[in-house]
Amino acid sequence: MTSPTHSAGPGQGGAPPGKLVFTTPAGGRRVASVRFGRESRRDRLLPQLIRNCLLDDEGQQCVQVRLTAEDAANPAARALLETETGTALHLHRLLGDTDYAPLFPRVVGHELDTAEPFLLYAAPRGIAAARTHVMAASDQQRFTRDLMTALCVLDGQGLVLRGLSPATVLWDGARVQLWGLEAVTRAGRPRSPWGRLPFCSPEQRRGEGLADSRDAVWSAAQVLYRLVTGRPGPADGAPADLGEHRVLDRMFRKAFDPRAVGRPTPAEVLDLVSPGAGDRIRLTVPADETRPHREAFEEALRLKRQAPLARPRDGSGAPSERGNGEVLCPYCLQTIQLDLTKLFVADNTMQYKQPLDVSGISNPVVLDDIMRGAVQKCAADPDFPEHVIPVPYLTNGRPLTVAMVGQSSTGKSHLLTQMIAAITDGGLEPFGLTWQSVNPEQHARFVRERVQPLRNGNVLDHTAALGLDDFARFVESLLITDARGQVRPVAFFDLGGEDLVRTDAALRFLLGVDALVFVVDPALALPLPELDHARQRWGVEVNRDGDLAFGTVLDRLPKNGPYLDVPAAMVLGKADLLRFRPPVDRWLSRPPATSLDAALVRAESRDVHSLLRGHAGQAWLRPFDAIRRCTLHIASATGGQEDRGRYPAGAGPRRVLEPLLALLAMHGLIDVPGGAEAFAVGEAPGFETVPGRRAPGSGSTAGGTADGTTGGTAGGAAGGESR
């Protein structure tokens, strides 16, 4: 990174004044007149540009880090800016006005969901160490103390700064300021090649193993050697002349070990520089306002565990199968069963008008192949427009019907599209599941009309209505094969929000639904200041009474005991609107799941429950309160908000498959410890081993979290690791 500089003052040969609109660290919106200075490449290997600017309304000097529209179209470039923004905002919240805040750049604002995203910092303090000649011995100890203190703060948050170099460490003669936050990753994440010789550790250079705070200790040792001697050190071990520099040798001899396991931690180096300094790092931990909400969640699970089952269930966890091989037609929503006299295949116009007679086919292989492409005309409802059902939907046992519930503004269609796309991309394979389209032609049309446009950055239109007063829209069906080789059709429906009509003719459909996904729109549920801008754009207001569609569905489902028995998942959708706010930031930054950890599912559920209970109120938690087995999740179908009708960098989904994985586990398609019945009510092994919050101290600067990771996040800290 090239260090910020004041050499080209705003308005001095820069761009003419204009307006800048951005979000402040507190979540508010600000419009300011701005004058820009000359622009330069932040680092020749990085896409970010940097320029000084002056906000005229307050005369505030800032530095803008931005991407051009061309660079911003690259998801990896956007991920770097997301990482930097998330890390900077997290440190802003964590450090406040403490003595540690000056060790890092101070955030002024950000605007990421736009064609040319940017981040604003307050004017930097000092000049890059790369521009400093040999450092005086009197400055070395202060410089080292500040640098290692900053690394201790990051280490306490489980963060590793991979890009530490003389270009990213600023020095004003009294204190250090650490830049290069785009290079932050989480400790324990796989290393990827990053940085330049000799400042990146050997393991990081090769992209081997897992990121470790001692990677940054190597970098710090190299920076100090450069400042003490005026030349770079060797890339794979200690400098030959290290012993000639007494202070440097005493503090960093072990730091040059080519393996992280042989190096000291940041706190251990700090203790060498200033004995006891690591133990003196204390950050004020705010009162835990989430505690009563977390306790309420645990109490709710306790009551659910004690409640008897409403009725016996089969091994899959689903209601008993209908007799005579009947299944629910995904179009007219009436029961239907296979009838070999009503089969058709497509003609040369791809219309299912050609009757199929299978009575003369004796070869079972040929018959199976023909039947896979065949359909049956459904006449269960003579008043419904003519429609056909793929034969595989009728011949693989009871279908699993998954219904998305919520108002039309919640983004259900985008979420469901990305959920199905994740399946077809192989997202179920780590769980022992494979998929096949029920109807290849229909699936190809779904990919062509829904998946591809969304991935290309287009905002999807509302799904076309398919009858029943716009109540239930059939979207897609797949054949899912589990690890035991058992095949089950899975049909996905989008239940209309405002169009949900409370009539038996429509709501009778709910009696056959096997799983529900309730999608919460944060703009409607959460009265948080960072959502005010979204509410203003969309013309909506906070609704304290919850989603009307939730209540309509819950009131119609059969209830034979204290709780409804249909498995459900609640999803805080459009979570990118809150991607820099805890606990959303922590979950959105996690990589996609490759195994189903009951403890993590419970931890995420507890965090979402606490967020909704603390800000939205109990009305928004009605599905969790009414349904015995209900998990809660955080997801974003697009990764960001649209700008002028498009997603500037395409739609990058985050955690869209996790709700479905939980439902499949509750239905027995994914094996989980303790069994499907115990999965969502806290009886599965591992639930009681979720780590609690640890108090800061002993060199630690922040508490752990419910998911066992350290608090906070680096925004998209796992992204952009291609360098």
Image: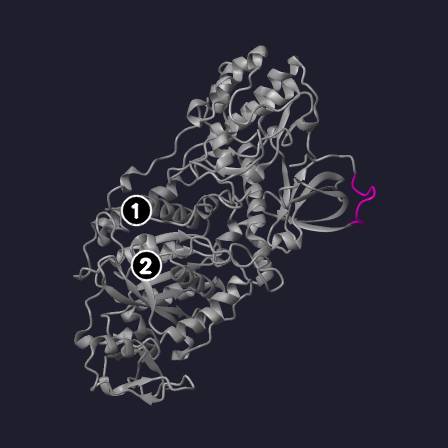
Residue at position x 60%, y 55% from top? 73
Residue type, mark 1 in image: Ala
Q: Nearer the viewer, mark 1 or mark 2?
A: 1
Q: Is residue 430 above or below residue 194?
A: below
Determine if the magenta segment contains residue 15: yes
Percent x, y of residue 295: 34, 42
Q: Mark 1 or 2 closer to N-term?
A: 2
User: Which residue range is magenta in the image?
Assistant: 9-17
Q: Amino acid at mark 2?
A: Ala
- Which is the main secondary structure of the residues drawn in magenta? loop
Query: Quick check: can you spot residue 625?
Result: no
Secondary element type, mark 2: strand
Q: Position of residue 31 (x, y in %)?
A: 70, 50
Relative depth, front residue between 180 and 146: 180
Can you say whether 85 is above or below 162 in the image? below
Residue 178 is at least partly visible in this image: yes
Q: Which mark is residue 568?
A: 2
On the image, which quarter does residue 350 sit in?
bottom left
The residue that label 1 is drawn on is 598
